[in-house]
Image: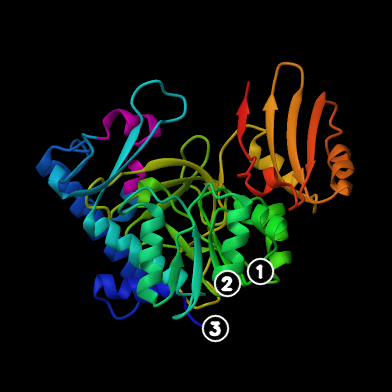
């Protein structure tokens, strides 16, 4: 089996001949110490931490960085000049009423992300192929643009589909452009496949959202092949881990990010145990973060990948949240083969669910699934292309509580 492309990427970026555990540990310690030194010199947010560590285990003694701290101190965490910043992503942080968190990237940060995307996409995209990129396009160095640039460098053609397309537009793109691969969010992909058919699409990369097992299995059944899940976040430069041909976890960009898994008390867990992912972004020029709590639940898969790589792998990732989340609803409702999409409104005394289904049979299935004792109001529509309103409709998936 071919070894993951991330090994070749790390060798090229770090100037080493082979990726070994010893080499990765050495790279991580050197880069971590370089970050600590910069923090001291520039009187950064982490200036009170030690300037140098003798080993990586000492990192466990450092305090965590939280999402609210990032929101309050985004500017203070910047370790480069404003003129070096190529991209800023702002986001309102959940649970806060003040300014949202801002994440900064230099041109080199963006270049490293493109190279990671090339490694991941290069596992299944080939020169001359056409890839539908159904990710947000919000100007230069946006997620969609970085993915599109990676596809161009591979020698393939990116279709800048973006998000928010109508079903009619998606069906036209599938019929006219004949894309063979897809990059986008999992639920959006499943909705498109059930509504428009798979057309020419043979392979797909899913990222940008938690992918329930039900959704994953449904997509793979339609495409008749395994998906290529990737993981990333704004805080780690939009790209964090990629799938290899083994389809057994996602290889982390370990030369740019140290990862830990912690329990509810903050204790570091051994490989194989599930907990919260904590990242230290030693490869970020603009805004390195130390022991940042991501709020994502996963585990580090023990041992070497069967592809031969020693680069650590993450298992599937999901948000740490309370019971009754949308991910759990997705996991239940998308078991219905006729379900294209749905939205839900929760009021004081009932749930109001609007569903789009491919047949009347799905309506009865939906009613049977929702027998949980709650008062539920259903508004079901059958998907028919002769319906002009449906043809021009965007996805109905809008989750909110009233």
Lower sequence index among marks 2 and 3: 3
Mark 3: which secondary structure?
loop
Q: Residue visible at 27% across and 70% down?
A: 13
The residues tagged by marks 3 and 1 sit, at their Cα atoms, a distance apart of: 29 Å
Q: Residue visible at 42% across and 48% down?
A: 233
Q: Name the residue under label 2.
A: 178
User: Relative to the observer, which residue lies in front, 155 or 101?
Assistant: 155
Asked if residue 238 can be seen in this view, the reply is no
Q: Is residue 63 magenta?
A: yes
Give the quadrant of the C terminus: top right
Q: Quadrant of residue 382?
A: top right
- Residue 82 placement, left or right of 123: left
Lower sequence index among marks 3 and 1: 3
Whether residues under marks 1 and 2 lie with C-beta atoms below 8 angstroms apart, the answer is yes
Q: Could you say which disc has been placed on residue 1 in the image?
A: 3
Mark 1: which secondary structure?
loop
Q: What stretch is highlighted in magenta?
A: 59-74
Q: In this view, does 355 lie above or below 385?
A: above
Instruction: Judge depth for marks 2 and 3 and give the one in front.
Output: 2
Asked if residue 369 can be seen in this view, the reply is yes
């Amino acid at each position: 089996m071919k070894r993951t492309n991330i090994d070749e990427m790390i060798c090229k970026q770090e100037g080493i001949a082979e990726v070994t555990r010893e080499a990765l540990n050495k790279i991580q310690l050197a880069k971590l110490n370089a970050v600590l030194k910069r923090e001291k010199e520039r009187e950064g947010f982490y200036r009170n931490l030690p300037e140098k560590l003798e080993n990586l285990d000492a990192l466990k003694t450092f305090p965590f960085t939280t999402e609210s701290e990032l929101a309050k101190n985004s500017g203070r965490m910047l370790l480069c000049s404003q003129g070096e910043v190529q991209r800023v992503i702002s986001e309102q942080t959940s649970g806060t009423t003040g300014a949202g968190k801002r994440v900064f990237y230099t041109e080199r940060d963006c270049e490293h992300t493109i190279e990671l995307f090339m490694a991941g996409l290069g596992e299944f995209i080939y020169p001359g192929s056409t890839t539908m990129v159904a990710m947000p396009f919000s100007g230069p160095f946006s997620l969609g643009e970085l993915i599109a640039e990676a596809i161009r460098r591979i020698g393939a053609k990116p279709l800048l589909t973006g998000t928010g397309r109508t079903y009619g537009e998606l069906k036209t793109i599938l019929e006219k452009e004949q894309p063979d691969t897809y990059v986008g969010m999992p639920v959006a992909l499943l909705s498109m496949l059930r509504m428009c058919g798979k057309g020419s699409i043979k392979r797909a990369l899913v990222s940008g959202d938690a992918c329930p097992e039900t959704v994953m299995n449904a997509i793979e059944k339609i495409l008749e092949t395994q998906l290529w899940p990737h993981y990333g976040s704004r805080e780690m430069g939009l790209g964090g881990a990629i799938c290899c041909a083994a389809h057994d976890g996602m290889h982390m960009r370990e030369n740019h990010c140290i990862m830990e898994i912690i329990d509810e008390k903050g204790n570091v867990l051994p490989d194989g145990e599930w907990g919260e992912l904590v990242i230290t972004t030693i490869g970020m020029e603009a805004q390195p973060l130390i022991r940042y709590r991501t709020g994502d639940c996963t585990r580090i898969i023990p041992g070497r990948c069967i592809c031969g790589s020693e680069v650590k792998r993450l298992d599937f990732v999901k948000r740490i949240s309370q019971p009754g989340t949308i991910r759990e609803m997705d996991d239940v409702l998308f078991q219905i083969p006729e379900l294209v999409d749905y939205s839900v409104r929760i009021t004081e005394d009932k749930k109001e669910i609007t569903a789009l289904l491919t047949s009347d049979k799905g309506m009865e299935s939906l009613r049977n699934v929702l027998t949980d004792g709650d008062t539920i109001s259903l508004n079901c529509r059958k998907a028919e292309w002769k319906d002009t309103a449906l043809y021009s409709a965007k996805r109905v998936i809008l989750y909110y509580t009233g």
